[in-house]
Structure formats: C-alpha cells, structure tokens
C-alpha cells in the first residue's frame, strides 16, 4: 500500500496544517486576549545561589490487570552557575499499584512529609496511580530540596503544579515552605495541553512561542496567562501559569507555573533560570532540568535488571515458572516475537 | 554514591526514603565495563599533566578483599552523549564537563587476594569498583618474584616506582634472551647495565653464569665519547675479563691481547663468511677428511696441500678460490696465530665472570668469523663437560646484530644450533638486534626472556608478539611509544610483561661504586634499594 492510497491522507494533512500553522499572530491574540505588550523580555541574570532541578521517573516491571509493579525514582540535581554540584536521589523503590492498597501506599508519605491525613483516592487506572505516586515522590524531592536550599536559590520542577486533587495539599505545603524560606519555585512543563480556538483545539504554547519569536526575536521572554482566555487551571492550585522562552537562540517555549507568592514578581526568578538555559547540551531548556532528567531517568537496562531481580525474588519464594510467566508476560512480547524473560 | 540513612531527614522520613547523593568525583575512576579480558573506566578529560593517564600505566582496582591489577592499553575520547556535537561550535558551550571524559581501556594482569599472592584472574571486578593508580603497596608482590640481575626500576607509565627494582633471573639465562630496540633506544646501555650486574654477582660469589660480550664498536671496554665502559666499574672489576685485538687497549693491565691459534679454526668457521658454489662447498666439506684438523689451515696453502685437494677431484680453480679466501681472512685477522686465548676465555666464563672481547674497527665479516670460532669452541667444551656441570657455571653468549646469524636466510647454523640445543648444555644466547622481524620465528620462540625497548616497525613488533611466551599483542601501542631507556621485559618467573626504565649506566655505576659492602638480597631476588 502506498501513502496515496490512504483516502483520508489529504484531509488529515489539511487538519494538521490548520492546527499547527499560525497565519499571522492577530487571530491568536484576539482569541486569547493576549496583547503585544504582554510579551515581556527577560534579561538573563546569573546569581550566586544554587539551582535545584527536581524530576522523577517511572518504569513498569509487570502488570496483571488488577495490580502492577513499577520502579519509581525521584530526586534532584543541584547546580551552582554552570557547575554541577551533586545529584540527590530521594526515592528509588518499587511501587505496587492496586486500587485497594492505594491509601496504605500514599498516606504514610503524605502524613510524614506534608502533615496530610486521610487523603481520599478514587482511581482504578493503574498507570495513573503509578504516575500519582511518582508525582508524590517528586513533591517529597522538592521538599528535600527546600530543606537544603537557601534564600534566593531557585528550585525548578519538571512538570506542572496543576495536579491530581488528593495531592494538592502536598503542593500547598511545598508553596508555604518555599515562601517561608525565600526560595523561588517554578514548575516547567515540556508539554502542555493548553489550547485556544473555538472550532478546533489549537496548541497554545507552540503558537505563543511562534508569536513571541516574531515579536521579540532573539530574546528570552515571558507572558502571564492571568486573565487571559486560556484555561490553565488557575485558582485550583494557588498559583499562576506563564509561557516562557528561556533562551533567545531557541524557538521553544514552555508552560511555567509559579506559586501565588512568587507570581506577581516572577521576573527575577525567570532571569535566574534564563541565565542557565542556553547550554550546548540542551539549548532553550533550563540546563539543571536537563541534567536531572538524565541522572534520574530509569533507563531500559535498569528496568530490565529490576525485573530480573523481581523474578529471582519470586522464584526464591517458591513461585513456579508457570506462575511467574503468567505474572510477567506481556502478550505484546509474543506478538512482537521478543524474548520476554 | 553515598547512601544516607539519616542525614538531614529525620526518623521515620529517613525510613521511608532511600536518600543517596552523587557528587563530583563519584563517577570517574570506577569500573564501568566490560568483561573478564578487558576493563573500562573513565577519567576526567582535562586532567593535569601529573595525573594524565598513559598507555602502559598500571592501575589497581579494589574490590572487597581482592586487588586487581590492570594495564592501560588505550585511551579514548568519550562522553555520555551521542552524536557529533564535538565537531561543532556548540562544543564550546557545554555545561557538564563531567559528562565528557576519557574512557580508559585496560588489560587485566591478575589479582592479589590477601596473602595468597598474585594469580591470573578468572573473574572481573564488581561494577563501579574504585580504580586508582597502582603504587608501591600494590606492586609489593613483585619484589618476591624478581630475579638477581638488576637492570632497572619498575615503571608505571612515565613514573618510576623506585622501590621496585626490575631484575632478571640468572636461572632463565640459558633459555636465551633477546634485546630488541631501534637505534638509539638504549640497547648498549642495557647491555652494560646487565654486564655490570653480572660482574657484581661474580665478585660476590653469587654468579650462576658467565657472560660473553663481543664488542665490535669498542664501546664496552673503556666507553666512548664520555660514556663510561665496563672497566670503570672498579669496585667489581674482578668480575670482568677483557681481551682485545687492539694492541693499545691490550697494553692496559687487566686486558689480554686476544689470540686464536690456527688449530682452533675449523673449515665451517670459514664457510659461514662467504656464499659458496656447490663445488666450493663440497671442497670445504672435504677438508676435514683430507687434512689433519690441527694443521689444515697451513697445509692447504702449500703446493702439496693443493695437490691433495686436486687429487680428490676438485678443480684447481675451486681450490684456488678456497685458498685465496682463507688467506684474505688470515690477513684480516692478525690475532690468528700460534697463541690462543680461548681456554682462558672458557675458564673465566665457567667461573661466572663477564668476558669482554674487544674488537674495535674489525670488519663485520671478521667479527662473525671470530664469534663463530669462540662460540663453537664454547659449545663444544660445554658439551664435553656436560656430565659434571656442577663444576662450572652456565654461559650466555651475546650476539650483536643477531639477525645476521639467526635470520631465515643466514648461511650459518652455528648459532641456530646454540639456540636450539644450547640449553641442554648450559649455553644460552643473548641476541641483540634492531630488526627482530629478520630473525627466524622458530628460533625467536626459543627465547624466554625478551627485553623490548621501542620498536617503530609494525613487522618487528608483530614478529615478537607472535613468538613471545607471554602475550605481548595487547602491548603494541605501548611498545611503539616507549621512550629511550624504557623497556617492556617479558621473562620467566615474573607473571606478566613488566614495564621498566633501564638504569642509565653511569648512574648505576655510581650507585654500585658507592656500595659500602656487599648487601643481602631481598628474599629471592632484587637488591635492597640504595640510599644515594
């Protein structure tokens, strides 16, 4: 079959063009209520303090429909200027996702680190449960970073503060701690579902980035989404969302969330972040987050090794190979003719 | 990576977390791969010149109670990133210098476990086991396996490990030794250091073999161009017997004028000097049948002698060529006459002395002739005495430019026979050459001690690698990059090819002269370090 044989190819291509292309910035500004003056240039400003970049990683080991086991890791990388100082792993362990065990898995952490008790979880999707658990561990990593940060330091979190409702208390606790310590805290999301337009859902952050490139070429910039016609969940998590281009040499823009205590005067925090976002390794993205991602991610060999250790442990406990096979087998391995274990 | 069970996270929180901190320096100098036969570890790419890693350096890897030793084979640029970023201007804007590094590829030498000594390793160190430059402590076991003929110090890369002298075993010398180096890399210096150590052993009564050195360049006796000779080692001068064809040198006390009697020259000594036609070869072979072996050289030159040869069916032109060439050689070698030094030479060798035959300005052909006569005499005498070998020391015969007589196309079998069967009678060869590729591979494989001092020619290195008893193939780059005076020594009794820096002869001489009194050997071998 050739591409031309797809009957809907041209129609889909047309729709993609409609989604991605931006025919002039005026329609975008009219629809979103953003004005040219809303684009604020950022002068990168180096500082003496440290940048903490928090990230997490989640690798599925096995899944038997009613429950699953994932390897979770969370932590942060610390920089002083361009110099990496250390990477701290705050959590690295297995998480068993089972709807009926949720509270016993989450509550000890929520109570211990954020003083939250009786958080109510209603989630049956195992993948989401694992993601929430990883997010909770990331908040604990932020909490740990706050314990080691000094006033004026910057903490960057890979993600968004617009979170799963039962974890909002944890985020609120972190905001309070960060404010009390005088630490700048920002969440930087590499992807965002923010959209604009009435007929079809147009991607907001990329289009804001294209518009910014035209208005402030060669410059880092930011726009506040407060009171704009974009639903960024403001009000639900006690903070504000921004779109930021950290490096004038890059065309990539990111959604950035800031707690309410920081949002009114966000410029100094963005200046600090922009000063270290033009590395050769990852142009346009805060370099500390790049390093945190690489240091904390669970690579495939690690996942495979954890899986082997789990199998060995099950065998030691007397599980038969038939049982282990049933537990560990992903039928896709058979369909793809891959060796499973 | 440091694990923090408590740290700043108190009580129950610490139990819930498993906090680990990875800091600068934590990733370098740790084993990251690869298998039992090859270890990899990384080092910062911008090390200072003092800390820079070099091919040939030996590193130790501590893994529990085991200490592994590994020698650097190669160093590669590497990083944790894919792609070709380093060829663009972006390479100048990298933040994470720790992610760009040099990958060191090392060959395992073996391991030490507790007091059980050194052994080959059948396993590999744990992943991330720490790696450090091996120091005296890790090399300590080598002092136990070194021999008694000191030639230099252990070298780790360019650094000397002065506490560990490198010494060959006397007992390995009848298994033949090869000294290989291109011009100017220190062959003569090595031989003088080697001879000085042998003189020392002789005077101390510890010698186990006599060393014969035939010197066509006149540099061993008194030295040359401000470089000192063996006679300058006054403290151990008694361990040296000198013979010279140079009247002026021979006038010195302690140097005897060399003499070889006509009766000690055999037709085969003449045979190796020229290319002969088949009839000429037949005529040479017939000589020992036709003439009295003790007088053949004189008899064949007389009209009667010529007539006897022709009576055997040889044409006059054939016999004339023989006689002409014999006369040429006798004219060229005026030391051939009535008097003979051979018995003395033999006696001194059997006493375990260093015997230096000084033949300055002698032609290459005459040198070969003399070497042939002396070595044949020695081998014949050692064969006779083989039954009471307890009475005499073994013997090591040095051949300079050994490719002339041990090459695959060489016309003599004299030295080949020593290489092949000399060991049975306690006679070894010390072949010195800058072209090992020209030495017959089978003969080279008889050499159990190799002193390799820098060979630029790939074919030379390959020839040695294919013939060596110990695996030298992985050391190709190191041998190629050896500097003057540096050597890799592969020998019996020492478990791996040892990197060494050969003593500078003048320094060693100075050290030996300052010895107050004979000092005991450290266990089985090696000198105690001297405090200069």
Image (cartoon, coloured by chain):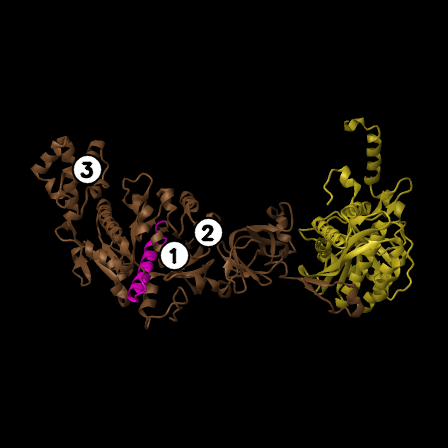
Chain colours: A yellow, B brown
Q: Secondary structure at mark 2?
A: helix
Q: Are marks 2 and 3 on the same chain?
A: yes
Judge from the rendering whether residue B528 lies leftward or rightward of residue A236; answer left or right. Answer: left
**Disc ID at residue B284:** 3
**Circle 1 residue:** B485
Q: Secondary structure at mark 3?
A: helix
Query: Of the residues under marks 1 and 2, which one precedes in the sequence?
Result: 2
Q: Are marks 3 and 1 on the same chain?
A: yes
Q: Is residue A323 visible?
A: yes
Say few, some or many: other residues with alpha carbon within 10 Å of mark 1 (under 14 / 14 to 19 / 20 or more). Answer: many
Residue A24: percent from left, percent from top: 82, 41
Viewer-side residue, B343 vs B231: B343
| B183 part of magenta stretch | yes
- How far is the residue under mark 1 from the one under mark 2? 14 Å
Labels 1 and 2 touching (C-beta < 8 A):
no
Query: Of the residues under marks 3 and 1, which one precedes in the sequence?
Result: 3
Judge from the rendering whether residue B29 lies leftward or rightward of residue B154; answer left or right. Answer: right
| B14 part of magenta stretch | no
- State the predominant SS element of the stretch in magenta: helix
**Circle 2 residue:** B478
């Amino acid at each position: 079959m050739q591409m031309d044989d797809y009957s809907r190819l041209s129609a889909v291509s047309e729709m993609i063009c409609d989604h991605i292309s931006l025919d002039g910035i005026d329609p975008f500004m009219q629809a979103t209520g953003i004005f040219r003056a809303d684009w604020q240039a950022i002068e990168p400003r180096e500082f003496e303090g440290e940048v903490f970049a928090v990230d997490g990683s989640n690798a599925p080991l096995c899944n038997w429909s009613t429950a699953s086991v994932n390897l979770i890791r969370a932590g942060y990388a610390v920089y002083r200027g361009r110099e990496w100082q250390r990477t701290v792993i705050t959590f690295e362990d297995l998480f068993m996702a089972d709807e009926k065990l949720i509270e016993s898995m989450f509550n000890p952490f929520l109570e211990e680190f954020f003083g939250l008790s009786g958080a109510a979880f209603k989630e049956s999707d195992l993948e989401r449960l694992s993601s929430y658990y990883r997010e909770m561990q990331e908040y604990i990593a932020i909490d740990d970073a706050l314990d080691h940060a000094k006033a004026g330091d910057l903490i960057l979190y890979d993600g968004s503060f617009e979170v799963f409702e039962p974890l909002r208390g944890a985020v609120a606790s972190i905001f309070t701690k960060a404010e009390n310590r005088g630490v700048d805290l920002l969440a930087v999301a590499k992807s965002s579902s923010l959209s604009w337009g009435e007929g079809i859902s147009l991607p907001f952050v990329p289009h804001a980035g294209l518009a910014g490139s035209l208005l402030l070429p060669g410059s880092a910039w930011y726009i506040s989404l407060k009171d704009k016609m974009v639903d960024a969940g403001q009000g639900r998590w006690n903070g504000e969302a921004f779109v930021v281009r950290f490096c004038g040499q890059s065309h990539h823009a990111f959604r950035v969330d800031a707690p309410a205590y920081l949002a009114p005067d966000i410029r100094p925090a963005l200046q600090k972040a922009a000063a270290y976002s033009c590395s050769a390794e990852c142009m346009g993205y805060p370099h500390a987050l790049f390093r945190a991602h690489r240091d904390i991610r669970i690579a495939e060999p690690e996942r495979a090794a954890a899986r082997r250790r789990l199998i060995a442990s099950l065998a030691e406990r007397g599980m038969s190979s038939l049982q282990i096979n049933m537990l560990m087998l992903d039928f896709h391995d058979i369909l793809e003719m891959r060796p499973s274990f | 990576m440091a694990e923090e069970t408590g740290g700043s996270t108190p009580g129950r929180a610490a139990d819930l977390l498993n906090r680990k901190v990875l800091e600068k320096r934590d990733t370098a100098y740790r084993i990251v791969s690869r298998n039992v036969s090859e270890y990899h570890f990384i080092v910062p790419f911008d090390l200072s010149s003092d800390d820079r890693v070099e091919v040939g350096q030996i590193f130790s890897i501590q893994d529990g109670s085991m200490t592994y030793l590994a020698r650097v084979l190669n160093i590669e640029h590497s990083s944790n990133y894919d792609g070709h970023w380093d060829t663009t201007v972006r390479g100048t804007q990298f933040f994470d210098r720790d992610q760009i590094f040099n990958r060191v590829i090392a060959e395992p030498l073996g391991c030490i476990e507790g007091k059980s000594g050194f052994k080959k390793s059948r396993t590999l160190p744990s992943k991330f086991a720490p790696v450090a430059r091996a120091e005296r402590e890790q090399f300590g076991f080598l002092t136990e396996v070194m021999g008694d003929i000191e030639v230099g110090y252990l070298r780790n890369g360019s650094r000397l490990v002065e506490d560990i002298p490198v010494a060959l075993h006397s007992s390995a010398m009848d298994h033949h030794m090869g000294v290989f180096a291109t011009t100017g890399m220190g062959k003569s210096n090595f031989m003088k250091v080697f001879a000085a150590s042998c003189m020392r052993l002789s005077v101390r009564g510890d010698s186990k073999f006599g060393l014969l050195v035939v010197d066509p360049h006149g540099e061993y006796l008194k030295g040359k161009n401000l470089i000192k000779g063996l006679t300058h080692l006054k403290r151990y001068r008694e361990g040296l017997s000198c013979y010279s064809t140079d009247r002026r040198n021979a006038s010195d006390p302690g140097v005897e004028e060399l003499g070889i009697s006509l009766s000690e020259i055999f037709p085969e000594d003449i045979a190796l000097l020229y290319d002969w036609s088949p009839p000429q070869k037949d005529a040479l072979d017939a000589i020992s049948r036709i003439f009295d072996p003790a007088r053949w050289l004189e008899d064949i030159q007389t009209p009667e002698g010529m007539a006897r040869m022709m009576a055997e069916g040889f044409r006059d032109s054939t016999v004339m060529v023989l006689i002409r060439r014999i006369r040429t050689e006798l004219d060229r070698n005026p030391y051939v006459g009535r008097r003979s030094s051979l018995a003395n030479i033999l006696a001194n060798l059997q006493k375990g002395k260093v015997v230096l035959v000084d033949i300055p300005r002698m032609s290459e052909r005459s040198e070969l002739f003399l070497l042939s006569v002396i070595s044949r005499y020695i081998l014949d005498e050692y064969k006779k005495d083989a039954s009471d070998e307890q009475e005499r020391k073994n013997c090591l015969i040095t051949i300079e430019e050994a490719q002339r007589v041990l090459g695959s196309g060489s016309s003599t079998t004299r030295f080949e026979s020593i290489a092949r069967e000399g060991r049975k009678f306690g006679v070894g060869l010390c072949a010195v050459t800058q072209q090992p590729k020209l030495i017959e591979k089978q003969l080279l494989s008889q050499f159990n001690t190799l002193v390799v001092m820098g060979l630029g020619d790939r074919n030379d290195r390959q020839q040695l690698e294919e013939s060596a008893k110990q695996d030298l193939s992985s050391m190709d780059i190191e041998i190629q990059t050896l500097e003057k005076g540096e050597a890799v020594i592969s020998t019996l009794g020492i478990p791996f090819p040892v990197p060494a820096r050969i003593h500078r002869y003048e320094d060693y001489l100075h050290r030996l002269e300052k010895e107050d009194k004979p000092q005991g050997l450290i266990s089985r071998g090696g000198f105690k370090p001297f405090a200069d």
